[in-house]
Amino acid sequence: MGKQVILVLEADEESRSDYIYISSVLDEWYNYRLNSDVKITPIFMGGKGNYKKKKIINKINKYSKIYQGGDTYVVYCFDTDKYDAKPEDAKTLEEEKRYCETCGYDFVWFCHDIEEVFLGKSVQKTEKTNKAREYSLSRGNRRMDKTRFQSEIMLKGRSNLVKVMEKIFD
């Protein structure tokens, strides 16, 4: 029996930057591209704050219904922004987490943003897509530090991505 993982990402569909990073981890550690029993379906929110818009919910429902291969897992992926310094960012993050828990979705966070976890630094908005593509192209030359993706607490440059994926893929 197969698995479908619906990744709901903050990036827009044109840039796909978040998906580029995350799919590299899934490919590196879970060989999802070689595994015909695993289907990854990205949904792009087109920006922070769009996580519960009707358009996004409709896409989740559509892809969940049409997948007949087994179980479907919905994984929302969020940058934490400056949650530790800006009360409004912490409040937003807590609302996103609560929404995922209420809906039965998995909640993945990147502290402070996905680029800090994958590249070790923040990137200007205009460079996000180019940096993600560069990362993807160069990934065969280095191994990713899995501990960066197994954090239970939010620390700069860390994520819980692998902890969530291990629950799904085990």
Image: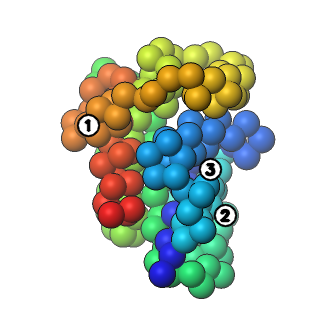
For the residues carrying marks 3 and 1, which lies nearer the camera in this image? Answer: 1
Q: Is residue 127 left or right of residue 154?
A: right
Residue highlighted by disc 3 = 45
Specify whether residue 93 is in view: no
The amino acid marked with disc number 2 is Lys
Q: Which residue is at a point 52% across and 52% down the rendered structure image?
A: 31
Separation of residues labelled 3 and 2 (CA atoms): 9 Å
Q: Is residue 21 left or right of residue 71?
A: right
Instruction: Tell which circle, 3 or 2, labels the residue nearer the N-terminal end.
Output: 3
Separation of residues labelled 2 and 1 (CA atoms): 31 Å
The amino acid marked with disc number 1 is Ser
Q: Which residue is at a point 54% across and 47% down the rendered structure image?
A: 27
**Element on which disc 2 rests:** helix
Instruction: Tell which circle, 2 or 1, labels the residue nearer the N-terminal end.
Output: 2
**Is disc 3 in contact with disc 2, using a CB cutoff of under 8 Å?**
no
Who is closer to the viewer here, 155 or 20? 20
Structural crowding at the residue carrying mark 1, measured as other residues with C-alpha within 10 Å and reported as few (<14), some (14–19) or many (≥20)? some
Instruction: Tell which circle, 3 or 1, labels the residue nearer the N-terminal end.
Output: 3
Structural crowding at the residue carrying mark 2, measured as other residues with C-alpha within 10 Å and reported as few (<14), some (14–19) or many (≥20)? few
Q: Quadrant of residue 151?
A: top left
**Element on which disc 1 rests:** loop
User: Residue 149, percent across and down?
Assistant: 35, 37
For the residues carrying marks 2 and 1, which lies nearer the camera in this image? Answer: 1
Who is closer to the viewer here, 109 or 28? 28
User: Residue 139, percent across and down?
Assistant: 58, 28
In which quadrant of the rendered image does the C terminus lie? bottom left
Q: Which residue is at a point 60% across and 68% down the rendered structure image?
A: 36
The amino acid marked with disc number 3 is Met
Who is closer to the viewer here, 125 or 66? 66
Residue highlighted by disc 2 = 55
Q: Which residue is at a point 36% across and 46% down the rendered structure image?
A: 162
Residue highlighted by disc 1 = 151
